[in-house]
Image: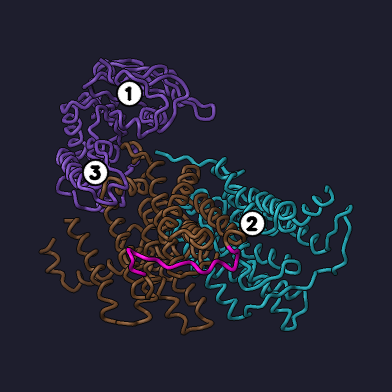
């Protein structure tokens, strides 16, 4: 029984790492612009699909991965430039529809380019099963956890220690004040979209060997990433990471111990319960209306 | 004056709905697509009360549509009930569920509310897929009986058109009645400034809950009718995407305008029918259209077009407008 | 007799006291002003009186009964109405509709009756319209009734808020810095409006920075400093109170007296 739980935890942390990266992407964009980007999941799909495509056209493996990340980051920048920037000042619900429109567009483009088939990337370093106590894991699981950890630390460092990171946070606090301090708000938004597309692409590429990918794989991942960000408390990037890991673990335990069909339902039920008890998420600050 | 104004628009809608099948008899587009439009208008107008007027967000309204449909389907096919009581029971179930979740969920705001309603919708949809013994699972349920009204069987496309026309127009009238009333102003006040509304005696928590429940009940009614009209239902008709589609109808038409919601529902029902000719490009184009409308006409198509045309008129006839003011 | 009685009221935000041990009474039919520098706790006081904030300590009694535990909308139905320092206009409605929301608690018909437009609803609607028009007329805004609220300039919106609060037919009207942002002409009009509101029998509790206005309309003035009472008295008493002059008013009093 305990061994089984250990196994579920390994799966949970692997899946949760993807959610964490997607959630982190949500949090970064939300922090910089107050927009919830429902196209976030499509970054994950595009990262994985374009890596598959670059490999298929004969690019060497490492180069294909880098190329895929670069393509996705460009898509993120383009999204900001052509869909978000022109709609500045739109209401919450309008921006939700715009980003959903963008998600549909990207999905349509992927469908055109790559068709409806399901693809997988080769494992990064073999498929030899490793033993961890009595639980098993693949080298790819370690890749997912390891790279996620490195990225999370890097993002943390970026926002805590670099001037650009601080400038992005300043945009979140008060756009006008940031502008008056000489911060190029437009550029900071661009950087944040690029970053979250980058994170999404990496997440997509990391799990593609285990979880496969197809043109419509981005939707559920996007929703899970959003759940992770909300669970952690919108705007808290480390909260989003914690939320993602928690969600992954809950799902995996739910699937293993109760029912695999209901695993998503259980994850969302937990999110609902958390929201009802803590309306601004686990690590979010309570917003007060000033009258 | 505003009362007269309101009636004019509604009468025009009634005439248009009545004339269409006369002008285009036996037309697939009018009868079959018309019925689909009827369902979508009902859903959009109902959701518009909650989103457009009260300023809230729901990304899970398809759940209520589905609950109504499944209540009707399960009670008629598995227990041999006749459609009307089944529809009533569906309504009661949705009423109770919506009421129970409304208080805790509607305390949330903005993206948190979006998440909660989205989560609720997905949970309900998963139950439809997984509770195979009850719902038939992903394959859905078939053999749902049609409707009969006092011995008049609703058994042709045209008859369904008539039924949906009446129900849809009733929903529109209901919405128009609410908006220009004490309760409707309270709703809009919640949108404008919740604190101000409270200090003027509006129990905002109650108002939000009431309109959420009403909107859910209308969706349930639409769902029951949908089940009887299609004779077959499956979970895909009630998933997250459909919730988003209904929200899109509301936003596309123009928030806080009943006719905007009607217009949005019509456009979004017709659009895929038209885009079919683009085959593989369909999804791409749909996404592009959605984005463009929201970027360039953030107030929605209906409001945008009405403002645009009055602006044009004003430019064309400056003298007439000046004296008219 | 006191219409509003505040006893040992306190409010702390995360350990910092915004209001501490504050007691005062507002006699029925009077115009009572609360003054004090920014951050003295005036708006916090208003938010507690209207039920938006829950006091940390003390009691608020209105017309002999406690307001403890009441939601803002319940406070409103007791007969307390307010305006806001930062405009809280319903920008999605016309001026008339804004004021009609003010009549909310004077009418009854609910969502479902309205949906079916039962006969009583139409009658009540006419009554609400009449009340709202009367309030607009009283505030000199009748000619703007059909205009969308977002088309009005700031000064007129401030008066719309007053009309909206009056449409609730309150016994006590809380006015949060009604003169802020107004020019001299508008301020003079406001002064007359406040006097007429008082003459109508409505008790007014006024928070204001414009000393001229306060000294001209108030029966009693309360001076707040760092959340506590510094002084209370008639306008003359306040103007001559050395503590007030030292702590806060200074030259401004001289200006106001001229």
Q: Which residue is mark 2?
A: A264
Q: Is residue A97 left or right of residue A49?
A: left
Magenta segment boundaries in residue numbering = B136-153
Q: Which residue is mark 1?
A: C250
Q: Is residue B109 above or below residue A75?
A: above
Q: Residue at coordinates 60% horizontally, 49% vertically from top-left?
A: A271
Q: Chain of mark 1?
A: C
Q: Chain of mark 3?
A: C
Q: Chain of mark 2?
A: A
Q: A169 or A257, which is in the foreground?
A: A257
Label 2: how many Cα within 10 Å (few below 14, some 14–19, many 20+): many
Q: Tell me, what hue is chain B?
A: brown
Q: Is residue C77 above or below residue B74?
A: above
Q: Which chain is cyan?
A: A
Whether residue B144 appears in magenta in the rendering, the answer is yes
Regarding mark 3 in the picture, which secondary structure is present there?
A: helix
Q: Is residue A77 left or right of residue A94?
A: right
Q: Which residue is mark 3?
A: C100
Q: Residue C239 appears in which quarter of the rendering?
A: top left
Q: Residue B161 appears in which quarter of the rendering?
A: bottom left
Q: C111 or B91, which is in the foreground?
A: B91
Regarding mark 2 in the picture, which secondary structure is present there?
A: helix
Residue C95 place in picture, x, y as percent? 23, 48
In this picture the colour scheme is: by chain
Q: C257 or A18, which is in the foreground?
A: A18
Residue B132 place in picture, x, y as percent? 62, 61
Q: Could you tell me how far apart the alpha carbons at marks 1 and 2 are, in whole angstroms?
A: 67 Å
Q: Could you tell me how far apart the alpha carbons at marks 2 and 3 are, in whole angstroms?
A: 47 Å
Residue A240 place in picture, x, y as percent? 63, 51
Q: Could you tell me how far apart the alpha carbons at marks 3 and 1 are, in whole angstroms?
A: 43 Å
Given contact means CB atoms under 8 Å apart, are the residues at marks 2 and 3 in contact? no
């Amino acid at each position: 029984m305990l061994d089984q739980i250990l196994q579920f935890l390994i799966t949970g942390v692997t899946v949760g790492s993807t959610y964490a990266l997607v959630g982190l992407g949500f949090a970064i964009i939300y922090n910089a612009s107050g927009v919830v980007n429902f196209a976030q999941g499509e970054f994950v799909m595009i990262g994985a699909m374009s890596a598959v495509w670059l490999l298929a056209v004969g690019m060497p493996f490492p180069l294909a991965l880098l190329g895929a990340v670069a393509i996705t980051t460009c898509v993120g920048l383009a999204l900001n430039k052509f869909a978000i920037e022109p709609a500045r000042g739109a209401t919450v619900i309008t921006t939700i529809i715009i980003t959903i429109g963008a998600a549909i567009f990207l999905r349509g483009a992927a469908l055109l380019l790559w068709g409806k088939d399901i693809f997988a990337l080769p494992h990064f370093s073999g498929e030899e099963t490793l033993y961890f106590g009595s639980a098993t894991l693949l080298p790819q699981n370690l890749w997912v956890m390891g790279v996620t950890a490195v990225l999370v630390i890097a993002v943390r460092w970026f926002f805590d220690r670099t001037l650009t990171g601080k400038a992005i946070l300043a945009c979140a606090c008060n756009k006008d004040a940031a502008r008056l301090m000489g911060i190029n708000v437009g550029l900071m938004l661009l950087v944040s979209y690029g970053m979250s597309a980058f994170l999404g692409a990496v997440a997509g590429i990391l799990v593609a060997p285990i979880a496969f990918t197809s043109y419509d794989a981005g939707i559920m991942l996007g929703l899970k990433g959003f759940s992770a960000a909300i669970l952690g408390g919108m705007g808290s990037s480390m909260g989003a990471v914690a939320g993602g890991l928690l969600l992954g673990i809950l799902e995996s335990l739910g699937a293993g111990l109760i029912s695999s069909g209901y695993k998503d339902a259980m994850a969302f039920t937990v999110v609902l319960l958390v929201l009802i008890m803590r309306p601004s998420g686990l690590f979010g600050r309570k917003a007060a209306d000033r009258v | 004056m505003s009362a007269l104004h309101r009636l004019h628009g509604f009468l025009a809608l009634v005439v248009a709905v009545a004339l269409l099948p006369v002008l285009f008899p036996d037309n697939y587009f009018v009868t079959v697509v018309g019925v689909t439009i009827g369902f979508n208008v009902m859903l959009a107008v109902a959701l518009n009360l909650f989103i457009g007027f009260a300023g809230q967000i729901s990304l899970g309204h398809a759940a209520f549509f589905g609950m109504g449909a499944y209540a009707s389907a399960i009670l008629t096919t598995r227990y041999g009930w006749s459609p009307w009581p089944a529809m009533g029971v569906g309504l009661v179930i949705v009423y109770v569920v919506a009421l129970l979740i409304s208080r805790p969920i509607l305390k949330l705001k903005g993206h948190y509310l979006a998440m909660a309603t989205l989560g609720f919708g997905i949970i309900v949809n998963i139950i439809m897929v997984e509770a195979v013994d009850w719902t038939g699972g992903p394959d859905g349920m078939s053999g749902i009986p049609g409707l009969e009204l006092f011995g008049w069987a609703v058994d042709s496309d045209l008859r369904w058109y008539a039924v949906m026309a009446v129900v849809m127009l009733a929903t529109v009238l209901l919405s128009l009645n609410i908006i220009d009333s004490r309760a409707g102003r309270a709703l809009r006040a919640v949108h404008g400034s919740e604190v101000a509304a409270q200090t003027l005696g509006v129990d905002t928590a109650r108002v939000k809950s009431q309109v959420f429940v009403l909107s859910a009940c209308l969706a349930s009614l639409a769902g029951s009718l949908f089940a009887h009209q299609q004779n077959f239902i499956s979970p895909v008709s009630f998933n997250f995407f459909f919730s988003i589609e209904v929200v899109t109808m509301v936003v596309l038409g123009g928030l806080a305008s009943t006719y905007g919601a009607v217009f949005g529902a019509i456009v979004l029902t017709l659009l895929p029918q038209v885009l079919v000719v683009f085959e593989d490009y369909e999804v791409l184009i749909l996404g592009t259209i959605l984005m463009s409308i929201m970027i360039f006409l953030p107030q929605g198509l209906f409001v945008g077009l009405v403002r645009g045309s009055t602006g044009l008129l004003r430019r064309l006839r400056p003298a007439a407008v000046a004296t008219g003011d | 007799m006191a219409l509003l009685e505040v006893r040992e009221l306190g409010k702390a935000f995360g350990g910092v006291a915004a209001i501490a041990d504050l007691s005062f009474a507002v006699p029925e039919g009077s115009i009572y002003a609360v003054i004090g520098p920014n951050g003295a706790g005036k708006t916090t006081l208003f938010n507690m009186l209207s039920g938006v904030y829950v006091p940390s300590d003390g009691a608020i009694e209105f017309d002999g009964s406690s307001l403890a535990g009441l939601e803002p909308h319940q406070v409103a139905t007791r007969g307390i109405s307010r305006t806001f320092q930062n405009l809280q206009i319903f920008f999605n409605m016309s001026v008339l509709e804004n004021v009609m929301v003010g009549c909310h608690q004077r009418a009854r018909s609910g969502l479902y009756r309205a949906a079916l437009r039962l006969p009583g609803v139409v009658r009540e609607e006419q009554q609400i319209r009449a009340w709202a028009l009367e309030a607009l007329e009283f505030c000199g805004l009748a000619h703007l009734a059909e205009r969308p609220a977002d088309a009005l300039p700031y000064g007129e919106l401030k008066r719309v808020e007053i009309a909206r609060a009056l449409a609730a037919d309150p016994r006590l009207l809380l006015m949060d810095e009604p003169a802020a942002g107004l020019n001299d002409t508008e301020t003079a009009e406001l002064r007359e409006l406040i006097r007429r509101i008082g003459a109508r029998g409505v008790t007014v509790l006024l928070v204001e920075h414009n000393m001229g206005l306060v000294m001209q309309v108030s029966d009693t003035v309360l001076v707040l400093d760092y959340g506590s009472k510094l002084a209370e008295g008639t306008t003359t008493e306040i103007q001559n109170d050395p503590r007030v002059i030292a702590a806060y008013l200074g030259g401004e009093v001289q200006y106001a007296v001229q």
